[in-house]
Each structure stands twice: as structure tokens, then as C-alpha cells.
Amino acid sequence: MTERRMTGRPASPGLASGPVFTIGKPKPRTERKAPAQEDGDAALRTAIDSALVDLVSLVEAVDEEGADIIGFQIAMLEDEALSEGAFDAIAAGVPPVHAWRSALEAEIADYERSEDAYFRARGTDLADIRDRVLAHLTGAAESEKVPPGSVLVGEDLPPSLFLSVDWSKGGAIALGAGSPSSHVAMLARSRRVPMVTGLGALEEASQAIVDGAAGTVTFDPDSASLADFGPALARRHEADARAETMKAEPVFLPNGTRVDIMINVASPDDLKGISPEICDGIGLVRTEFLFEPGRPLPDEEAQYAAYVAIAAWADGRPVTIRTLDAGGDKPIAGVTSDGESNPFLGLRGLRLSLARPETFRVQLRALARASLHHEIRIMLPMVTVPGELAEASALLDEVVASLIAEGTPCRRPPLGIMVEVPAAALGALRFPADFYSIGSNDLTQYTMAAARDIADVAGLNDAGDPAVLELMARAVGAGKARKVPVSICGDAAGEVRLVPKLIGVGLTCLSVPPALVGAVKAAIADFKHV
């Protein structure tokens, strides 16, 4: 077959080659008589119980990280709220298979509509639960065992299937959809399994080479590509070894300037198994993990406990916590607005928080309390004009004063802004923020008028474009003029090819995914000019 090279989103670094094993193909089914309508309720309960038995057995066979992920699925499946809609539909006369599928797909759709990668990734766990219960309802045969060393190719990969594969003999993952923030991606990174997501429509193939760092997959490689693979793998192993060596080391520019490397956190799960010694702090905590679709809004105590736990992990290092970045296509019941004609230009980020002060106050109270004994900084998303910062600052003052009046210990943390709207980058000097953090994802999207997840225009979404870099330089210049810190916390900070350009515009604080700390430090160590 003809060689085909595709580019997606890097999810787990590494280089691997192997035979293709296609996942998600229709499996042979054992004929099973559909339960009588009056037995539908019992049939679904039995299928759910059987699925729980499967998951409990799997928990006993995997490591702690895998057990935590399967434990999440067990908790979801045990929550009666998940199956309530299906049982209501069965009572109304809907067959159990259709009732369960419809109920779960509605839940999955809520997650997948989210703009936030963390929430979209949770949809995979729900799909895994859906399919496992359906298998028991319909009598589906057991999944075929994945041969060691295979490249798993398909639309998406359920966590339970990942955990059933023996990765000690190599292998990789190439997905048409999926997310770098999914549980599977987290597992892949911890086990050093190369993984690429977002490849789009996939065709049949017999062999593949996966470059997880570059986000490329070569299907049915020709003789030249196969000949290049061995030396490329050797070079990659050498680079990986150097990155691992440098991970816990500080890095400096040739003129002696230290470059601080922070990490981004989408949820507390990201910190498991990671030493704080590898970083200079946490440059971004996405608090959306607390606001799960379909769940009650987190109260002050739940938020306070989560912020303290994350800050305690940092062990005295600064922790920058972003306030709720909802809106757009990231709906949260009771908070976001419905029916906006252009949600990316609508009520989102700080605009939404200011429009919902009752929810915003709860988060600010929790953050002010958590800041008492920890180096916590508050970061506001999607700030466009100085008046928004002034309003948020006044609300924080009000919250702190209220806590003090109540006798509740607290501290007013530093208040900074994300520079992700071109207006904020161009006019950064107008914002009396305690710090600036460049959000390269939205800054690039809004500057280039191109979304990174739309294949037809993804090539325009380049954070290294001179226009985007000029806006970054404006923010850095404003920080120097006002003598306040400036960092970058978007995906661009973790792209090794962009590191010289980021250093070139004057950035000396980069916040990156934990898995990329060593590679970014190595790239900085190799930087030749100041």
C-alpha cells in the first residue's frame, strides 16, 4: 500500500513502529433474546452489576494510577444519577438497550461539547462505561486480545482497553479523535507509550510509525521510512535520556539569566507520581475540573480543599490558579448562557464570572482562604479592558473584607491577568495587574482567526507567526516597564521548536505540561543567543 503521513496532536512523546491493530471494529455478537419489556429494568440492573464486577476485577490487576482511573468509572457507574434517565425511559416502554444508549450518549454529549480539554476527555470514560454495560445487555463477545507491540488505531481508545494491553513489549496509539488531556493520554505518558490524537478520518493500514512528540503517524511506511526509523529511534532515545537527566536541573541562558519552568495542571490527577523538584511552581491550574457538567456547583469548602491540596504539593513554590474559564462551547448548568450566536466572542471567562458574581464570590473566598499559608496567585481569564480587572479587583477586596469581618483567616493574593485577547496584548500597559501570563492558545486563535481543531485552517493557527510573537513581545515589554512578572502558560511553551522564539521575545518563565519539562529545559540549555 502507498505510504501516508498524517499529522495530529501530540499526546505522549516517543517513537514506535509496529503492526496496526484496529480498535472499534464491530465485534461478533452472541445471539441473545431481548428481555421482555417487563424484564427490562432487571436486565439493565444486571448488566450494570456485571460491568461493575468487570471493573473491580480490572482494578485489582493494574497499578495505582490505573486503579484511580478505573475507580473514577466505578464511582460514575455506581452513581444512580447516571442511570436514572435510562430507568425512566424503560418505565415509559423504551427497550433497555436503547434506553441505556440514549441516556449515556446525552451525558457524553454534554462533556464533548465542552471547550475545555479536561471535560471533553472525560467523555471517553463515559463511552467506556456505556459500551461495557451494552456488551452485557446484548451478549457482545469479549474483545480480541491486542498482540504485544501493536499500534492501536481507531477513533478513540477506552481506558479499560489501554489497561488490558501489555505495553512492556512496545507499541503506540494513533487516534482519529481523542484528546491529549484524556485519561488514556495520561496513562500513555506515564508508561512512555507514544500517542497521537486528532488525526481525523483514518484508512485501513497494516503498519505504522508513530512519533508522539511531533504528532505524526506514517501509515504503511515505504522502505526509505523504515530504513530511517532505526537511526531516528536511537536519536530519540539519546534526547529522551538527556531530557530525563535535565528534568530536575535549573536552566540558564548564555548570559546567566535563569529561566523558570512551571507546570500546567488540568486537575489534581496530573500531579500524581510527579515530584515538585522538577519545576519552579505551577503556572496554571484550570479550576474547571471542579465544575463538572451535570453536577452541583462546588461549594466554598470543596474548592478550598482542592486549592490547598494543590498548593501543598508545590511545597512553597508559587501556584497560579485561574478562575473559572467557562462559556463559549464549555457550558456549565446554572452558570453559562444558552443560545449565543458566536460563543467564542460571547459571555465567557472573566466576563461570565462578573455577570455571575454569586458564583465568582464563592471561588474568590476559597482562594483567599487557601492563600493564607500558601504562595497562591489568582489569574483572570479572557480579560479585554481594564475595567474588567478593576471590577474583579474590587470584588476580591470586598470578599477579603467580608472574611476578615467574619473572623475567617485569609490573605489577599496577587491578582493577575491572562493575555489572550489581542486588545489586552496591545494595551497591556493599561492593566494594573500584579502579573501577566500569556495564554498562547486563544491569543493565537484570535490573532490568526483560525481554530487549531478545524483541519482546514489548523495550519494558520501557528503561535510562531510573527504577528503573534509581536503581541507577546508587547506584553513582555509592558511587564518590564511596570516591573511585574510575565510568563506564558499556553501550549506554545511546551513546543520545543518554539522555545527559541519565546526566549527571543524576552520570556524567561514558561509553564508547560509536566511530561515536557525535561525536553523544554534541554531546548533552553541549547539556546545560543540572548
Image (spheres, helix red, strand yellow):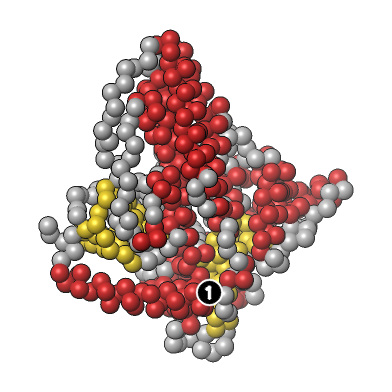
Residue 89 lies in what quarter of the image?
Answer: top left
Front residue of this view, candidates 68 and 200:
68
On screen, residue 265 above or below 143: below
The reply, left or right, for residue 395 in relation to residue 291 is right
User: In the rendering, at what x and y percent does residue 212 appear?
Assistant: 36, 63
- Counting every numbered tag in the picture gives 1
On screen, residue 226 above or below 530: above
Q: Residue at x 27, y 50 (%)?
A: 21
User: In the rendering, at what x and y percent does residue 339 appear?
Assistant: 45, 34
User: In the rendering, at what x and y percent does residue 414 appear?
Assistant: 70, 62
The residue to which callout 1 is attached is 247
Q: Residue furthest top?
A: 38
Q: Residue at x 52, y 64 (%)?
A: 514
The three-letter amino acid code for the residue at tag 1 is Lys
Q: Residue at x 33, y 67 (%)?
A: 15
User: In the rendering, at what x and y percent does residue 485 appear?
Assistant: 62, 71
Is residue 176 at least partly visible in the picture?
no
Q: Residue furthest bottom?
A: 255
The reply, left or right, for residue 173 in relation to residue 491 is left
On screen, residue 368 above or below 236: above
Front residue of this view, candidates 411 and 20:
20
For mark 1, does the 10 Å Cα neighbourhood hold few (<14), some (14 to 19), or many (20 or more) residues?
Answer: many
Q: Residue at x 37, y 66 (%)?
A: 14
Is residue 230 at least partly visible in the picture?
yes
The reply, left or right, for residue 140 in relation to residue 328 is left
On screen, residue 418 above or below 498: above
